[in-house]
Amino acid sequence: MLSFIRIARPLAAFRIAPLLFAAGASGGCQADSRPRGDAAFINESLLKVLTANGKRICVDRGTHGEPLAVFRAMLPAPDPVRRTLSWSAPTPLEDGRAITNRELFDIELGDGQVVLREPTQNGARLPFTAQLQLNALAREGSYQLSDSGPSVANSPAAPLAQVRWWLSNRFDSSCGEVYTFSKPIVMRDMGFVSVTAGHRGTTYAFRKDNNAWAPLAKWSTWLY
């Protein structure tokens, strides 16, 4: 289930943390030089969603993993678990819990542990028919690989989001949780992208209408 996790040893934990989400990190400091396409506009729309509450965020330029990997991993879950997963109105990702270097050091020595609180869903649940449609589209997309570019770019449409090289974000103490995007996947007029920050992650769905990409829904939040 998408519940709380207890980190016992950080070196092992951080090796398996992106287990479901990752398919390999992409593009460190090289920006994607291709013309802006659907993926770029989806990323821009996601930056706007994540900062809709007025919060400044730091975002990694490089993307990481496939957008529907966690959704695909949950497909064979038992029905009671599946019933807890749903699509809701697209709101910003809930604040997570940053783990300090001191906590990591204590855990590695066996002198401490970190418990992450189970996330709550902060958006209104979508109607049943919308759930069925989004689940069907996400299922279809979960078996496809994204061919989108490997980077996210700053956008004047989302001035509160600072997109930078991942190492710059890690050394900036003002960043708090650092946001990392998956590659977007585009299927006709639908798109999906996942985002992680502060040991929490979720997947957003987008729809193209009149050549503009708008957020449509947010899936259940998971811990990693």
Image: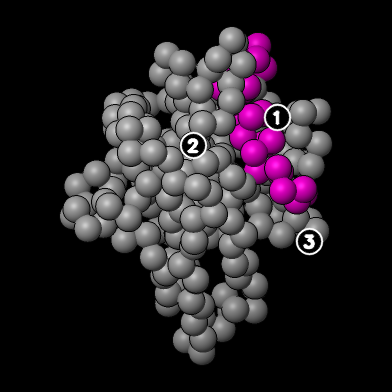
> Label 1, label 3: how many angstroms apart (C-alpha)?
21 Å
Q: Secondary structure at mark 3?
A: loop
**Mark 1 or mark 3, which has the lower sequence index?**
1
- Which image quadrant: the N terminus? bottom left
- Disc on the earlier residue, 2 or 1: 1
Q: Could you tell me the amino acid type at mark 1?
A: Ala
Q: Residue at x 65, y 11 (%)?
A: 35
Judging from the image, what secondary structure is the residue with disc 2 in?
strand
Residue 3 rendering spot, x and y as whole percentages: 39, 65
Q: Of 86 and 29, which appears nearest the observer? A: 86
**Depth-wise, is mark 2 or mark 3 nearer the camera?**
2
Contact, mark 2 vs mark 3 (Cβ under 8 Å): no
* Residue 26 at least partly seen: no
Task: Locate residue 117 relative to residue 74 in the image: left or right.
Answer: right
Residue 153, numbered circle: 1
Q: Position of residue 119 (x, y in %)?
A: 49, 62
